[in-house]
Image: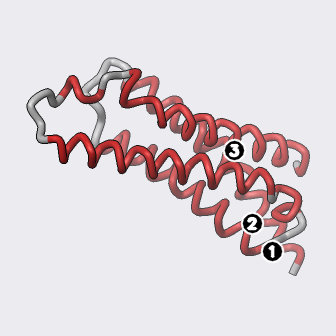
Amino acid sequence: MRKISSVLYTVGLVISSLVGLLHFFAPYVTEWYSYIPDAPLEIYASIDYVNFFFSLLLTGLSLILLVFKKKIYQGSREVFVFYAFLVFTWFCRVLITIVIPWPTPLQKWLIVGFLSEFMIVFIPAIYLFNYKKSAR
């Protein structure tokens, strides 16, 4: 189970970091501003700021957790807390996608994608949580 957990941990964090990196370019590639053409400049700036820091935090946290992979598998409680927060973030993303669906034909694929990513990062969290409990 440790090997599967380790592979899923790495895959999940690589996906998270790629989502974060791609999000830096999302407003421009998908032309977010075309949906609100008459909005004040402050709205555009707010969208840019929120997206930039979301992207920075998701990418940064994912990369930091990849660097600390050895520590988390040695039972580091501090690193596990950060990993648990990332898992919680993906869980919230799944919930909000279901509760407040986007008005897009891609909605079903978004749910599948977000739920898949959540499960990929959740399985190692279960293993690591149980590993920590048995190590005490």
Tag 1's secondary structure? Answer: helix
- Residue 60 horizontal/vertical position (percent): 62, 52
Camera-near label (2 vs 3) is 3
Neighbourhood count class around disc 2 (C-alpha, 10 Å): few under 14, some 14–19, many 20 upward: some
Q: CA distance from mark 1 to mark 3?
A: 23 Å
Question: Relative to 7, does residue 49 appear above or below in the rendering?
Answer: below
* Residue 82 lies in quadrant: bottom right
Farthest front residue in view? 41
* Dot placed on the residue nearer the N-terminal end, 1 or 3: 3
- Residue 77 horizontal/vertical position (percent): 75, 74
Residue at image position (41%, 21%) is 29
Q: Amino acid at mark 1?
A: Lys
Tag 2's secondary structure? Answer: helix
* Residue 97 lies in quadrant: top left
Neighbourhood count class around disc 1 (C-alpha, 10 Å): few under 14, some 14–19, many 20 upward: few
- Residue 48 horizontal/vertical position (percent): 34, 43
On the image, numbered disc 3 is attached to which residue? 13
Q: Check contact, mark 2 vs mark 1: CB within 8 A.
A: yes
Farthest left residue in view? 38
* Dot placed on the residue nearer the N-terminal end, 2 or 3: 3
On the image, numbered disc 2 is attached to which residue? 129
On the image, numbered disc 1 is attached to which residue? 133
Q: CA distance from mark 2 to mark 3?
A: 17 Å
Q: Amino acid at mark 3?
A: Leu
Q: Along the horizontal axis of the image, is 123 left or right of 35?
A: right
Residue 71 badge:
none
